[in-house]
Amino acid sequence: MPPLPFEKPVAELEAKIAELRQVASADIAIADEVERMQAKIDRLLAGIYAALTPAQKVAVARHEARPHFSDYVAGLFTEFTPLAGDRLFGEDAALLGGLARLNGRPCAVMGHERGRDTQSRITHNFGMARPEGYRKAQRLVALAARFGLPVVTFVDTAGAYPGVGAEERGQAEAIARSMQVFLAAPVPIVTVVIGEGGSGGAIAIACADRVYMLEHAVYSVISPEGCASILWRAAAQAEEAAAALRLTAQDLKRFSLIDGIVPEPVGGAHRHPEQAIQATGRQISRALNALTPWDGPALVQRRKANFLARAGGDL
Amino acid sequence: MAMNWLTDFIRPRIRSFVAPKDVPGDLWSKCPACEGMLFAPDLKTSHNVCTHCGHHLRMPVKDRLALLFDGRCYKTIAPPSVPDDPLRFRDRRRYTERLREARAATGLRDAITIAHGTIGGRGVVAAAFHFSFMGGSMGVAVGQGFLKAAREAVARRAALLAIPCSGGARMQEGALSLMQMPRTVLAVEEVRAAGLPYIVLLTDPTTGGVTASFAMLGDIHIAEPGAMIGFAGQRVIAETIRETLPPGFQTAEYLRENGMVDMVVPRKEMAAMLGRVLGLVMPDAEAA
């Protein structure tokens, strides 16, 4: 996998280490040298990642080695039992979900899955859900509400799929209804934006009691490319658009649109997926513990009040 | 309200709605659908419906509200004021500059008007979008306006009538505009919880985050003929699927065919249909 452009100095050092290891395998002097270079890499990475620009964060958020929904499920949940279908039209593999246990306690879990290789990306439609995905999400929330299970959602999508079939089957209605169902569910809901939070397709499963973002995740009303092509009339201005849109986790926190930021390992979640997954798991557990036990109506009331208080404030 | 809006408002509006470049003077314009010549006084009488082909041109909110409310009579309610430009957004131009320009051109503060009156004798609070104000896009001001309209409906025991005419979310307000989607959904919930009807009158165009929030959650969806209604833009879809789009794609009629809209009603019959529907769902006790 080619390194991100701003990671080039790191990649060069990593290549040198690999070279050293090849030329002399049992030399002690080389071990010292490798250690020294590794320390330099860590310093470099810490520096680079502390100062990522918004456009660079977009690239990190979309990094192909970044942990996906399925990785979080495998790393944090047991007995994951996928459930399929919206009972209306079909199954959508862009938005996966089902029942599982978190720390031994049953819950519902769902999220966008982008896929890893060409074949699985096609299977999962690059994480861009169709109405069936959002209707399955509604079904899962209703199921969780019926059995008193908390809901955990993972957001990672460029957006809801823009296709003829999706429009025909009511993409807009599916997203709107999904928000309505989430906002009225009498069980705790915790959302983590793990990669890209793309517009309506993201917020459809992010109307939660607690919303977190990974340190280098982004969450936006429109992709920087889309914004640039409309407002600058040039997709090449995506870098400027990324900055103007204020789409970083730090921006969202500053505007009080999310509850917290999950720190990523040095060099980003794609470098140490397991660390990122475990940190996310700890945040989810803390949030659910704080929300448990719950009184359904009071929980719904607070969730509604939270959203009304955001981005304008209640009247 | 003085009646001089007929002369002060309609004429300049018509000029801006139809391409005046290739038509002589102010009195004539061209139908964007059939290219037939339209005489301004005729267009006024027909409520901006093409006198040749029946194409529904866009219509200023003032005219639309006058057409819908009983006796052309309604009162506006000031939307809550919100701070401008929370992100200090700048593309090729500053957002504050675009706002200033839109305000100067329309005389509006933002893209939403709240009005109350009666339709068919039933109390109604309307939340109507101005496409002429930055494409009717929904930012914090519009979200707050919509919430205010819902609260007014509940306080007055009136129906809420949403009249979207919008390209979607206001990009210049980033995630703050995205948050207006759940916020307007909550506004609708308050009306429903109060047992009051929520009607959506879908006009051309209704797209993006506006469609994917309050506009698709009505008790009843009524659309104007030919109105473009959808989630994704046609250019984006065409680029994604690399195919030409089916004829009539994302029109009001297409949405009715696909089960997303209850009925497509011509403009001249709209007030009567709204009155009829409201009469059927609102008990007489709540007639205003």
Image (tube, rainbow, N blue to C red):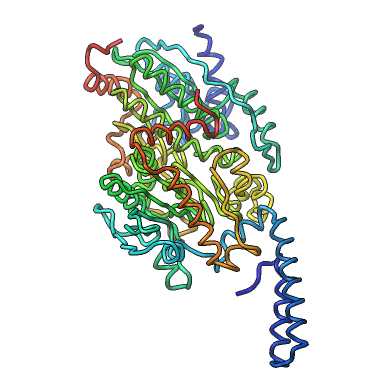
Tell me if I can see residue B126 in this picture.
Answer: yes
Above or below, A132 against B194 in this view is: below
Q: Residue at x 60, y 33 (%)?
A: B21
Where is residue A260 drawn, in percent x and y? 56, 46
> Which residue is more in the foreground, B285 or A312?
A312
> Which residue is more in the foreground, B122 or B186?
B186
Tell me if I can see residue B234 in this picture.
Answer: no
Above or below, B142 against B258 in this view is: above
> Which residue is more in the foreground, A83 or B85?
A83
Where is residue A58 drawn, in percent x and y? 61, 56
Where is residue B106 drawn, in percent x and y? 59, 23
Quarter the C terminus of chain B occupies: top left
Q: Residue at x 57, y 52 (%)?
A: A218
Q: Residue at x 48, y 19 (%)?
A: B62
> Which residue is more in the foreground, B269 or B213?
B213
Tell how many labels: 0
Where is residue B85 drawn, in percent x and y? 65, 33
Above or below, A275 against B211 in this view is: below
The single residue placed furthest to the top in the displayed view is B2
Above or below, B191 against A100 in this view is: above
